[in-house]
Image (cartoon, helix red, strand yellow):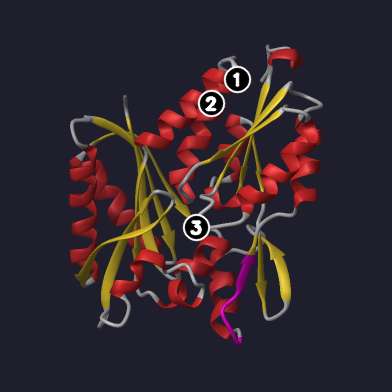
Amino acid sequence: MDGNDTASRVAIITDSTSDLPDEICTQYEITSVPLNVTIDGETWLDGVMSQQEFFDRMRAAESLPTTSQPSVGAFVDVYADALTRAAHVVSVHISSELSGTLTSAHAAAERFAGKVTVIDSRNLSWGLGFQVIEAAKAALEGASLDAIVQRTERARDRVEMLVGLDNLDNLVKGGRVGRVAGFVGSMLNLKVTLTVEDGAFEPIARTRGAKAALEHTVDWVAERMGTASKAAFCVMYALGEDRAASLAEALQARFDVTEIHVVPTGSVIATHTGTGWGVAFLPEE
């Protein structure tokens, strides 16, 4: 935010379910508040463990890890710090249908007399992350608060995300199955793909085999691109980095890619998805 005075600055806050790498947060001056993951009674901040370590611990655990939103106090501390450098905060978070994070953010925001605007992304991972980046770009450009909120909401309307799961075990055990319930009990080693509609998971298809699942993923992207000719992409993975790299190559071969990221999902997201892959993209307007 160099070059803007504090009186006109807007600070951008998100949470760790955005899966934004540290270098992206640094580049765009984004602050990420970590959620919590608890395994066999021991609690870590999201992002502390490597993905491999997390999966090793999860597989050895007596029961599925549990996750929890940041405390109100954690948000209060982050907002108070941000407001020493900015006049206002825009705080963009994981869908309220999937986490209580937004509730904590709203409760903290009430303590700052209208200086904090909280936005429900109605998404997660880079479906959230692209919205946060758009907000941060606008803030760095010196846009007004209203313009930043509008740009974030436009990104929310345009962003698309697919999640591919190797199985539904974690989603079911974690209670996030929702509208995916009809797919349970008939998987028979099929891969399942989901999208996010109205802030919750919505099933798309069942596909037999990894190759067919990735082909289906690319075809789905083509369908959702509509008339857009260019887009920024992110491929997410929960183990299976090689699969993610192959998917990224397939996307680059088929679409006009303005930028592409390949990132691991954090422990909180992986708790509920288990192993799998995802792709989020933001078409150019």
Disc 2 from disc 3: Cα separation = 26 Å
* Residue nearest the viewer, comparing 103 with 14: 103
- Residue 198 location in percent, x, y? 40, 48
Q: In the image, 74: left or right of 47?
A: right
Q: Is residue 98 magenta?
A: no
**Whole-percent x, y for residue 223 in the image:** 18, 44
Question: Is 274 situated above or below 150?
Answer: below
Residue 66 drawn in magenta:
yes
Q: How many C-alpha atoms fall within 10 Å of the one at disc 3: few (<14), some, or many (≥20)?
A: many
Element marked by disc 3: loop
Amino acid under disc 1: Leu
- The amino acid type, in three-letter code, at marker 2 is Val
First in sequence: mark 3 or mark 1?
1
Residue at the image point whose x is 64% and y is 59% from the top: 46
Per the image, the residue denoted by label 1 is: 145
Question: Can the viewer see residue 19?
Answer: no
The residue positioned 46% from the left and 48% from the top of the image is: 123
- Tell me the tag on residue 149: 2
SS category of the residue bearing label 1? helix
Pointer 3 residue: 265
The x and y percentages for residue 158 are 35, 35
Label 2 with label 3: CB-CB less than 8 Å? no
Per the rendered image, the range of residues in magenta is 62-67
Q: Label 2: how many residues lie within 10 Å, few (<14), some (14-19) or many (20+)?
A: many
